[in-house]
Image: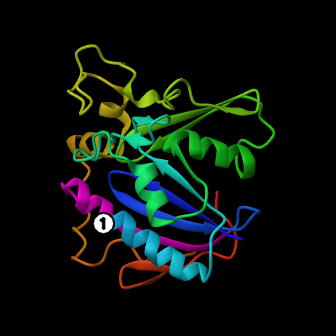
Amino acid sequence: MLTLCLDIGGTKIAAGLADPGGTLVHTDIRPTPPGGGAEEVWAAVAATIADSLRAAGGPVAAVGIASAGPIDLHSGTVSPINIGSWRGFPLRDRVADAVPGVPVRLGGDGVCMALGEHWRGAGRGARFMLGMVVSTGVGGGLVLDGLPYTGRTGNAGHVGHMVIEMDGRPCPCGGRGCVETVAAGPALVRWARANGWSAPPTPAPGSWPPRRWPGIRWRSGRSTEAPPRSRR
């Protein structure tokens, strides 16, 4: 049976159906509603789940959720810094209601990425590793002695909010000078523009995600078929 995999961040919401060997057989990607209310963001997640379940053509074995953080593993809630309307949002329970009768597991996106790389990617064979996510924000996840290390609440390894510039830029977390203010995608773009880079024209409405991404075919702005093999 297939496993439904969800990845929820400040820029995009993605879903995949993976076989027991880790090969993706379906993907679906759509933008996170910018500035959307809690239920508007959830509606996008729910639509992604529904489309993926239809693509599965039958029951799935389980659901895994990788969410931007902070998260709370014990309560199953998330408070992503880059999704301002989700504060203590009961993501695990909402997904369980949408996909009843199967195990649902929640993790921080950094540790989920680190586990994937440890299993199938660049971290194979490593006993200790730090995986980093650089996107709308900066996340991280730890594998220690071959096992995921989540810490008390699930946020261990979240390096994006370590302070590296004491008087640096304000961060959405409320601090100043966090790694995220320097190295996240928007911060890198800001730095590049300040140093003379000019952005390409803004894509027309309805043209996101970009159709030139290799290995994914698109229909109505969403992927309809996964690459034949998992990608690292």
Q: Residue 41's spot in the image, x, y percent?
A: 28, 59
Please state which amino acid type lies under the numbered disc 1: Ala
Quarter of the image for residue 170 reads top left
Position above or below: 91 against 213: above
- To which residue does mark 1 refer? 43
Which residue is most to the bottom? 219
Write the residue at 51% across / 35% down.
140
Query: In the image shown, does 59 or 206 lie closer to the viewer?
Result: 59
Q: Residue 151's spot in the image, x, y percent?
A: 55, 25
Q: Is residue 126 left or right of residue 215?
A: right
Position above or below: 167 against 102: above
Q: Which quadrant is home to the N terminus? A: bottom right
Write the residue at 70% across / 50% down.
121
Q: How busy is the neighbourhood of tag 1: few (under 14 within 10 Å), some, or many (20 plus)?
A: few
Query: In the image shown, does 65 or 133 lie closer to the viewer?
Result: 65
Q: Which quadrant is home to the C terminus? A: bottom right
Write the residue at 72% across / 33% down.
147
| Residue 211 inside the magenta-drawn segment | no
Q: Residue 156's spot in the image, x, y percent?
A: 52, 26
Which residue is most to the front? 101
Position above or below: 114 against 54: above
Q: How is the image coloured?
A: rainbow
- The secondary element bearing badge 1 is classed as helix
Which residue is most to the top? 166
Write the residue at 58% across / 46% down.
113
- Please report the bounds of the magenta region as a residue range: 24-42
